[in-house]
Image (cartoon, rainbow, N blue to C red):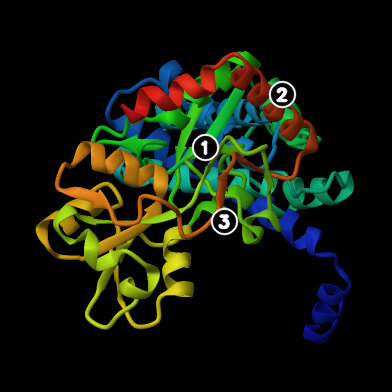
Amino acid sequence: MIRLLLFLLLLAPSTLLADEMLYRLINQRLSLMEQVAAYKWINEQPIAVPEREAFVISKAVDDGLQYGITTDSSGAFFWAQIEAAKDIQQCWFDRWSAGQAPETAEDLVGIVRPKLILLGSEITSRLAKKTNDGKLFNRLFSQDLPIDCLSEGAHQKVFDALKSVTTYPDRHTQVMDSGRLRVGTTGDYAPFSYSGDDLSFTGIDIDLALNLAESLDVELVFIKTSWPSLMNDLAAGLFDIAMSGVSIIPARQQHAYFSAPYHVGGKSPITLCSRVHEFSSLEAIDQPGVHAIVNPGGTNERFIDTKLRRAKKILHQDNRTIFDEIIKGNADLMITDSIEVRLQTNLHPELCGSMPARTLTYQEKGYMLPKDPVLLDAVNQWLEQIRSQQILQKTFELHLR
């Protein structure tokens, strides 16, 4: 028997196993409705909570965009689950009205709901990879995965909605159809993207993201990312475009598209004005005893790792406070983009660029996207338009003052 099972598993495509896991996750989620019903019964709460249902649908639709799932089909699928959930809860209410009712129940907010949220996320992550094998679906979902108190009608609606889940053919279609442009930004790189403790973003790229969303006539959604996770977040579908002063480099171009450059600069050192004479060349910087501070994961760290052999690298996680470390004397200098040097020397009179006449590298910045030529073309057309209208230039001037 074991040999036969192993043989069948070897023959079975991975999608079969993936489908089986998807169906079991749906089963687990609906099976939790007995616990939900018990909590509501004991606490005399209604089964239907329209505000909560609307929130669940909205979140499911937004989460589905990460996997390219169409908003209509993901909304319909999770609405079918909500209807099934209410169907199950009503069944338990009817049973308890006619017989012995539960006296205790697990806390809905603290225990049961987190389980539901986790299962919902797992289900969403697998929806785009499902097959539409009706026979397999019927066997797994109907025969192998029975759910107590689920009516045949509600079961059929979940069945039909799951079969109808579809994905977008490309990212541009997704943006335009969903009406959402998800912009990944780090919030730690002024003047391009900066966020305070309230998590609101400001900067050149934040203003330009608003302009891009307006030109596409879609809603703008900011997604917080980081330099170490930037490429993985893009690959995972967490956002549609990265707008955060991202440098165009070959390592990134292997996995993503870049818009036409919208800024040209390069790496440049910044230190205390009283010490600029000490760091007037890369050779002078790369000496034992020199402490170069850097934020992890981006081109600043890549430059340090490539060019400095004798100076000591100091990693500082929060790029928003990194220049304070130089002022306090905890680091000797930082090598960063020349535009950031320009901004920070305006903000901090104690700081100066130690090589103002030239940069250590040539560097272009662009907007990073998944490999979708239609979306890339739309972004480049918009970029050309705001350049010709002087919007690009004026936005830079505004944030560098």
Residue type beneath disc 3: Asn
Q: Earlier in the sequence, mark 2 or mark 1?
A: 1
Residue 232 falls in image quadrant: bottom right
Badge 2, how many Cα within 10 Å: few under 14, some, many 20+?
some
Is residue 183 positioned above or below 321 on the image? above
Rendered location of residue 194, percent (x, y) = 34, 37
Rendered location of residue 77, percent (x, y) = 67, 31
Name the residue beneath numbered marker 2: 381
Name the residue beneath numbered marker 1: 243
Badge 3, how many Cα within 10 Å: few under 14, some, many 20+?
some
Q: Nearer the viewer, mark 3 or mark 2?
A: 2
Badge 1, how many Cα within 10 Å: few under 14, some, many 20+?
many
Rendered location of residue 336, percent (x, y) = 38, 54
Q: Nearer the viewer, mark 3 or mark 1?
A: 1
Name the residue beneath numbered marker 3: 232
Q: Is 23 on the left or on the right of 392, as rendered?
A: right
Question: Is the Cβ of the residue at disc 2 closer than 8 Å to that at disc 1?
Answer: no
Identified at 66% across, 31% down, the residue is 74
Real-space Cα separation, disc 2 to disc 1, in angstroms: 16 Å
Q: Earlier in the sequence, mark 3 or mark 2?
A: 3
Identified at 87% across, 47% down, the residue is 133
Residue at the bottom extreme?
Answer: 3
Q: Is 326 on the left or on the right of 252, as rendered?
A: left
Q: Nearer the viewer, mark 2 or mark 1?
A: 2
Circle 1: element type = loop
Quadrant in which the N terminus appears: bottom right
